[in-house]
């Protein structure tokens, strides 16, 4: 079953706090897009990775047998129980519990298999950050439309007409004489229409998870419309795209998604700059792996910003929350025995999700790279 982003986020919180009954979770992420020959490649990839990981870990025979059962479960999901429209699949298995969770998304995931003490949730966090719903508001003086776009595309459309068009007979096509009056274009009627669209937009934002709005209108109309908007709606407009009467709805929504992606990148760049300015003993900024870990251990992180490309192997303690980039014999926090992990940064992401911190993923942000690829905005200094 293909998940909505809201359901996937709820599952993500459960996964972040899950503990393996026998010490190991198997996490599999795969691209199941029709563009990839996944039915042939995925089983071969998974079997090869399973052999490599168990060899590197020196996995005992009995443990390997149990892990093999977990892998067989994943292969059965691929073979028999996958929704055809799915683009990306994430499966989390702990056969000893038993614990079986899967999330299907309309987003291609990188092929990966991990066998570690906790579910590897970082790919899912990244995917969900890019699947946030948004609204496109196409506005004119007499006829406007609101489009809610979710992870699958157009989810809801709401058409709103100016007051002079409401008196027309939709069945006969006869248009009221009112349309021919000069008053039909008077600013008072236009303002009334704009206010109605703005109120509908505010209600749509309140009832959905959308945080961003793209305004599609001629520039002068966009400026006039903004002046009539409620504050809650005005603050969520992140971009404008030009109104093109010849463009189809699908073309407009593609332009809207591109505008949202560009706006999101600017927001992440601004967040990185804000964190950088707040670094210091009395500031609310923190940067670098070790300092971010310390802030997470103190439950201080409000927003975590991670470079998508920053991945580093490391070590983690299964008794506490310590994570490190270099090998140690004993956990410096509790004295436990650390175990290797393929992506230590992913462990910080998991801790942030567990603490209900907002996790943002950035890419090609110079300020974030200067701060070591990971930074955070604290709840308090």
Image (cartoon, rainbow, N blue to C red):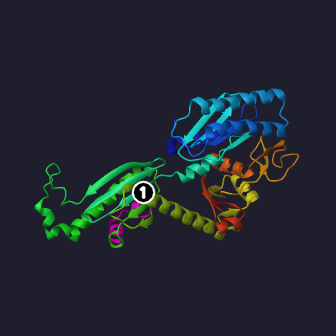
Where's residue 62, x and y in %?
81, 26
Magenta range is 222-236
For residue 166, side relative to residue 14 (left or right): left
- Farthest residue in the left direction? 177
Where's residue 111, x and y in %?
66, 44
Callout 1 crowding tier (Cα within 10 Å): few <14, some 14–19, many ≥20: many
Residue 104 occupies which quadrant of the picture? top right
Q: Secondary structure at mark 1?
A: helix
The residue under the point 87% across, 49% down is 328
Where's residue 215, x and y in %?
39, 63
The residue under the point 25% across, 63% down is 142
Report if residue 355 is visible in the image.
Answer: no
Q: Which residue is mark 1?
A: 253
The residue under the point 79% across, 39% down is 52
Q: Is residue 371 above or below residue 250?
A: below
The C terminus lies in which quarter of the figure?
bottom right
Q: State the residue in front, 261 or 19.
A: 261
For residue 67, side relative to residue 229 (left or right): right
- Farthest residue in the bottom direction? 220
Q: State the residue in front, 92 or 53.
A: 53
Q: Is residue 14 above or below residue 197?
A: above
For residue 207, side relative to residue 35 (left or right): left
């Amino acid at each position: 079953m293909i998940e909505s982003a809201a359901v996937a986020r709820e599952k993500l919180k459960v996964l972040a706090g899950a503990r393996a009954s026998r010490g190991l979770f198997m996490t599999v992420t795969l691209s199941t897009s029709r563009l990839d020959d996944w039915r042939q490649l995925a089983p071969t990839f998974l079997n090869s990775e399973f052999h490599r990981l168990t060899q590197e870990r020196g996995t005992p025979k009995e443990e390997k047998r149990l892990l093999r059962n977990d892998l067989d479960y994943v292969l059965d999901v691929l073979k028999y129980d996958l929704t055809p429209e799915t683009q990306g699949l994430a499966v989390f298995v702990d056969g000893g519990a038993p614990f079986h969770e899967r999330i299907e998304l309309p987003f291609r995931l990188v092929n990966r298999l991990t066998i570690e003490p906790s579910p590897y949730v970082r790919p899912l966090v990244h995917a969900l950050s890019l699947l946030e719903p948004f609204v496109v508001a196409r506005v004119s003086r007499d006829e406007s439309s609101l489009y809610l776009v979710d992870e699958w595309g157009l989810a809801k459309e709401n058409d709103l007409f100016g007051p002079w068009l409401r008196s027309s007979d939709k069945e006969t096509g006869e248009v009221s004489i009112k349309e021919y009056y000069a008053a039909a274009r008077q600013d008072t009627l236009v303002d009334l229409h704009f206010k109605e669209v703005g109120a509908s937009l505010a209600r749509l934002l309140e009832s959905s998870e959308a945080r961003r709005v793209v305004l599609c209108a001629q520039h002068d109309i966009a400026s006039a419309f903004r002046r009539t908007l409620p504050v809650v709606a005005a603050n969520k407009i992140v971009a404008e795209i030009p109104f093109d009467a010849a463009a189809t709805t699908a073309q407009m929504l593609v332009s809207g998604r591109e505008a949202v992606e560009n706006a999101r990148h600017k927001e992440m760049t601004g967040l990185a700059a804000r964190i950088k300015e707040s670094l210091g003993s009395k500031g609310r900024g923190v940067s670098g792996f070790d300092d971010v870990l310390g802030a997470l251990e103190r439950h201080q992180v409000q927003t975590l910003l991670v470079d998508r490309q920053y991945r580093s192997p490391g070590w983690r303690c299964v008794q506490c929350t310590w994570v490190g980039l270099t090998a140690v014999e004993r956990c410096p926090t509790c004295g436990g025995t650390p175990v290797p992990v393929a992506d230590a940064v992913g462990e910080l992401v998991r801790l942030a999700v567990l603490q209900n911190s907002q996790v943002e993923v950035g890419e090609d942000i110079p300020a974030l790279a200067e701060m070591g690829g990971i930074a955070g905005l604290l709840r308090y200094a």
